[in-house]
Image: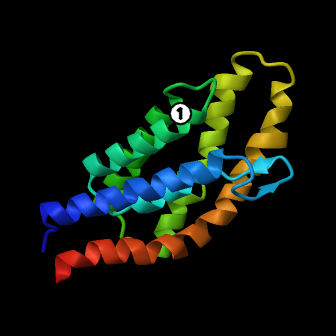
Amino acid sequence: MELTTHQKTVKYTVYCLVIAVAGLLQNTPGLFWQIGSARCFLLLPVTLLLVMGERELPAALLGLFAGCVWDLHAAKSAGFNALFFMLLCFGVSAVMERYIRSTFVTHMLFALPAPFLYGLLYWLCFILIKGVDGGTNTLFTFYLPCALYTAVVAPILWFLLRPLRQRLNRKALQ
C-alpha cells in the first residue's frame, strides 16, 4: 500500500529536520565530538541512510537539500556539496530500488565508502588543483581521518535512524 500525500509530507518533513539537525551538529564547533583534527562528516551518512529505499526523485531532492545545508557553511565550495549529494543520493537510490535489497550490509556498502569518495573529490577539486600550500599533506592529516571517523559512525547512525525510517514507512501498511 502506498503512502498518502499527507504521510509523504510528514515523512519528508521529518527527514529534512533530521538532515538540518545533522548539519547543525556537524558544522557548529563543539556540538559533535572531534578526534584530533578529524571531524565527522555527519551529513553524508545521515542523508544516505535516509534516502536508501526511496524513489530517485525524492532521494535526489533530499540529497540536494543536504548539500545546500552543507554549502551554507562552506567557504570555498559553493554548489559542490549540493551537486555531489544530489548525484550520490540519486545513484544510490536507483541501485537500491532496482537491484539490491535493503539490509544492514547493503546500506554499509554505500555508506562506508561515501566519505572517502567525498574527501578525495573535495581534496582534488579544492586543494590539489588550486595549488594550496601544504595541500598534499591535508589528504592524510585531515580528509582521510575525517572519512575514517565518518565511516566508523555510519553503522551507529544506521541503528539510530532505522526505527525512524520504519515508523515513517510503516504508515503505508496500516
Q: Looking at the picture, how far across and down is residue 17, in whole percent?
A: 42, 56
Residue at 55 percent of width and 49 percent of height: 23
Q: Looking at the picture, how far across and down is residue 73, in whole percent?
A: 59, 35
Question: Would residue 76 appear left or right of 140 to someone viewing this image?
Answer: left
Image colouring: rainbow
For the N terminus, the quadrant is: bottom left
- Residue 119 in sight in this render: yes
Residue at 66 percent of width and 40 percent of height: 119
Residue at 63 percent of width and 23 percent of height: 76
Query: Which residue was labeled with disc 1?
Result: 72
Q: Looking at the picture, how far across and down is residue 98, in whole percent?
A: 28, 59
Figure check: 150 above or below 116: below
Q: Amino acid at mark 1?
A: Leu
Question: Would residue 76 appear left or right of 54 to someone viewing this image?
Answer: right
Q: Quadrant of residue 173?
A: bottom left
Front-lying residue, 66 or 94: 66
Q: Label 1: how many residues lie within 10 Å, few (<14), some (14-19) or many (20+)?
A: some
Figure check: 79 above or below 102: above
- Residue 51 in sight in this render: no
Q: Quadrant of residue 42?
A: bottom right
For the C terminus, the quadrant is: bottom left
Residue at 82 percent of width and 28 percent of height: 136
In the structure shown, which secondary structural element does the residue marked by tag 1 occupy? helix
**Which residue, as the protein is rendered here, is positioned at the far top?**
131
